[in-house]
Amino acid sequence: MTHPALVVHRFGNGRTGALAVGDFWHSGLKDESSQRDLGKAWRQMVRWLVADVPNRIDLQVEQKQSDANEAILLQVRVRNPKFQPLENAAVTLTINSVGQRLDDKTESSQSPPSRSIRLNAEPSLNEPGLYEATFIPRETGGYYAQAVVTNSVGAEVGRAESGWTSDPAAEEFRSLKPNRLLMQTLAKKTGGEVVPLNHLEEFVATLPSRKVPIRETWSFPLWHQPLVFLFALFCFVAEWGLRRWKGMA
């Protein structure tokens, strides 16, 4: 087509469009019904341009299914004005429980103290512009996270918010079947072993011959070490000699 009426094109992760009909607005001058159709056309065109366009800062929350501590993986994707991955950025995450979220502008003396936790997200090794941090919830309930992104010169790029709920007890009692994989993982990390029920008697028979590690905690004053005492004495003599040499003593 030599003279197109509407030209659209992809730009990064967004869309651009140009309406080349200069007197398009004339179509709405006929009557009230035509004016409504013209307004509807413009709204649909604008909605199509901005639909499915990602934000410059995206915060995603993902629960690590294989983690025994119910750890939460926080992923922040940062993009520059051209919606390309932004590297060399600093990402700070502030996490609060839902009941303790405070607004800096409305915080008063009657507000309860906030127990916020701050984390610094680290750049991902697998994807440019992706920054990750791990958070382990200690209490059951809802959590609110805010990510603040600054560029290499310290200027703020943008912010993103997200939230989630954590209930480790519900996950634990979701299934009554024994989690054999979790038990094997715990046994491997702690130096133990998983004993099948049909081998229980054999395991009990080997207990008298097994070596049980004995751990003792002991402490001693560091000052009582001869090398530490000689080092302190040397420093004292060196300081006194330096002062005598410079005529300060």
Image: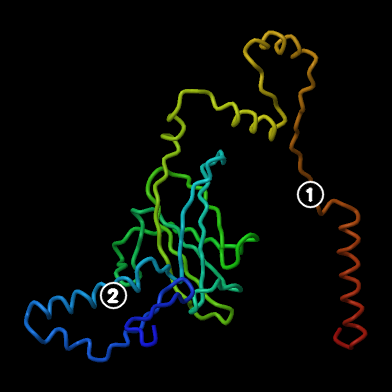
Q: Residue furthest left?
A: 31
Q: Residues within 10 Å of mark 1 (few under 14, many from 20)?
A: few
Query: Which of pointers 2 and 1 lies earlier in the amino acid sequence?
Result: 2
Residue 132 locus on image (x, y percent): 56, 59
Tag 1, which secondary structure? loop
Q: Nearer the viewer, residue 205 or 244?
A: 205
Number of numbered discs: 2
Q: Residue furthest front?
A: 1
Q: Nearer the viewer, residue 195 or 115?
A: 195
Q: Are the two marked residues, 2 and 1, in contact with CB atoms closer than 8 angstroms?
A: no
Residue beneath disc 2: 45
Going by the image, does 5 lie left or right of 224?
A: left
Q: Residues within 10 Å of mark 2 (few under 14, many from 20)?
A: few
Tag 2, which secondary structure? helix
Amino acid type for the residue under numbered disc 2 = Met
Write the residue at 76% across / 28% down. 214
- Vertical order, 64 against 32 (above or below): above
Closer to the camera: disc 2 or disc 1?
2
Amino acid type for the residue under numbered disc 1 = Pro
Circle number at residue 66 = none
Write the residue at 50% across / 23% down. 177
Disc 2 versus disc 1: distance between alpha carbons? Answer: 77 Å
Circle number at residue 221 = 1
- Vertical order, 238 against 206 (above or below): below
Quarter location, residue 215: top right
Write the residue at 66% across / 22% down. 194
Going by the image, does 235 lie left or right of 163?
A: right
Is the N terminus in the top left, top right, bottom left or bottom right quadrant? Answer: bottom left
Is the C terminus in the top left, top right, bottom left or bottom right quadrant? Answer: bottom right
Residue 202 locus on image (x, y percent): 72, 9
